[in-house]
Image (spheres, grey):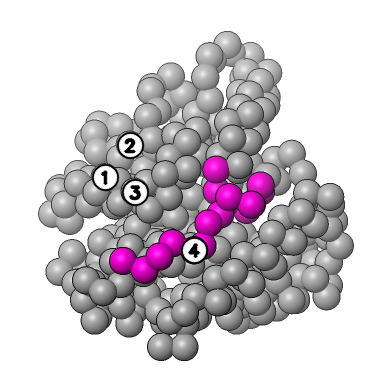
Amino acid sequence: MISNNYSFDEFEWLLGQKLSEKVPELSQKMHSSILEKTNQDLNKNFKSFSPWMCYHRDIDRLQKHFKRPYTGKVLDEHKTIESLRKVLESHEGYTDLTSEESFRITFSTTQEMEKQNFTPRINKAIESLFALHPWLKVIFDHLIKEIMSIKSVGNINFERIGLSTHQAKGLILFSLIDKTDPIAHERLVIDIAHECAHQIVQVFISGDKILDNQSKFVYSGARWEEREAIRSFHGIMAHVYESATALRFLEKDFFSMSNCLREYLLEELKTLILRINVSTDQIKKNCTFTALGSAIFNEIDLYISKISKFPLMKH
């Protein structure tokens, strides 16, 4: 084990314990606002928030899902999945939960989930994530309402998919990589951290613009292409959480982990730092910030300064 010199205690908005103390109130405000608007629009009196209240295209047909319990666990009940499939896949044979034309997804069947061992693998990965970041459990419990299994359709076959969407806040969608991959578990843990970051950004921007010119296109290190600034910010936050998780893995088990995993994590850490640096530099050059946005980006700078000094980064 490498000594843990990379505390997140000084951060308030980026990650760590102080953020976990802020998220419950922020998430409650966001969920209450969505619930109130839904009740007004539908002339109903639903008592609690559901991710599907954000999906306005077929909100009438999704009302049956507003009342069922949401516990942050994997949805693996056949009738519920098929009910969602009838609504969300009735237009083109795939969901429109993502706006990217080439990124077409459909829900996995329960048989496909069982073949992948989806639920146990997700549960094990979440447990590992909380062991690395105990503070993240509070955030997860308040933000993540449900997890579903998906697969890609059409011409593009992604190796693995993780997806959060404003059309279903609190829902995380995953397509798992081959479970025979020797580092599949660690990669999944990092992917879940990535999606947690997206959910945190959704809470932030529900109450604050972060960037005064969100829609301005800037060059992003996430995909090495120009993207809207707010999407680039999403990518930065996701990369922060990925890199923080890779760092914790390395600190915890560096000398006992396999060479394959060690090399993968070190390379990931280097690449993620590069991507964050490129994206933040471009946003700073082209955008202005709200007070909260400035605070977050100041913490991103501090974070990069800290983890760039990891002693094995030049391995």
Of callouts 4 and 3, which one flags the residue occurring earlier in the amino acid sequence?
A: 4
Please name the predominant secondary structure of the magenta segment in the image.
loop
Q: Is residue 240 left or right of residue 212?
A: left
Q: Disc 2 vs disc 1: which is toward the camera?
A: 1
Which residue in the protein does label 4 denote?
5
Q: Disc 2 vs disc 4: which is toward the camera?
A: 4
> Can you say whether 272 is above or below 24 in the image?
below
Per the rendered image, the range of residues in magenta is 1-17
The amino acid at mark 1 is Asn
The answer to the question of whether label 2 and label 1 lie on touching residues, with beta carbons closer than 8 A, is yes
Spatial distance from mark 2 to mark 1, Cα to Cα?
8 Å
Spatial distance from mark 4 to mark 3, Cα to Cα?
17 Å
> Can you say whether 25 is above or below 89 in the image?
above
Spatial distance from mark 3 to mark 2, Cα to Cα?
18 Å
**Residue 123 got which mark?**
1
Question: Callout 1: 10 Å neighbours few (<14), some, many (20+)?
Answer: some
